[in-house]
Image (spheres, rainbow, N blue to C red):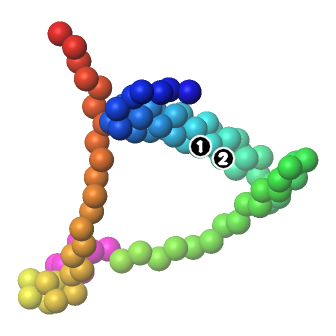
Amino acid sequence: MLTNLTLADRYANAKARADEAEAILKAIREEILATGVERLDGAFASVTVALSERSSLDSASVKKMLTPEQVAAVTKVSLVTTLRVKPVVHA
């Protein structure tokens, strides 16, 4: 366990571990999908694979069809918080 670290260092460490776990999870997901089966059963869990369709609106095409005023009228603006992690380089 890492102790006496700054909040930034704790965050960077946790993010690195989360990124590693995400990579492992992605690889296992691809392995599951490669089996081609709909259900995998284990001693502790079952995994079900389901295929579904998703529709999305092509906003670039819609913007070509609408006037700038119409686009502004249907545009939703929201605040986004972003955290970026960069290692400190000591000279």
Residue 26 has which mark? Answer: 1
| x then y, percent, for residue 9 | 36, 31
Image coordinates of residue 6 in percent, x first then y, are: 34, 32
Does the CB distance between marks 2 and 1 fall below 8 Å? yes
Q: In the image shown, does 80 or 75 lie closer to the viewer?
A: 80
Q: Is residue 60 magenta?
A: yes
Dot 1 crowding, Cα within 10 Å, few <14, some 14–19, many 20+: few
The amino acid at mark 1 is Lys
Mark 1 lies on a secondary structure that is helix
Is most of the magenta stretch helix, strand or loop?
A: helix
* Left or right: residue 73 compared with residue 15: left
* Left or right, 52 with reference to 5: right
Residue 90's x, y, as percent? Answer: 22, 14
Circle 2: element type: helix
Q: Residue at x 21, y 81 (%)?
A: 75
Hey, which quadrant is residue 79 in on the image?
Answer: bottom left
Side (left or right) of 27 relative to 8:
right
Does residue 77 appear anywhere in the picture?
Answer: yes
Judging by the rendered image, the residue that carries numbered circle 2 is 29
Residue that appears at 76% across and 52% down: 36
Nearer the observer, 20 or 69: 20
Give the residue displayed 27% in from the left and 62% down from the top: 80
Q: Residues within 10 Å of mark 2 (few under 14, many from 20)?
A: few
Quadrant of residue 85 within the rendered picture: top left
First to last magenta residue range: 58-65
Query: The disc labelled 2 sits on which kind of residue?
Result: Arg
Residue reaching furthest to the front: 4
**Residue depicted at 52% across the width and 73% down the height:** 54
Disc number for residue 61: none
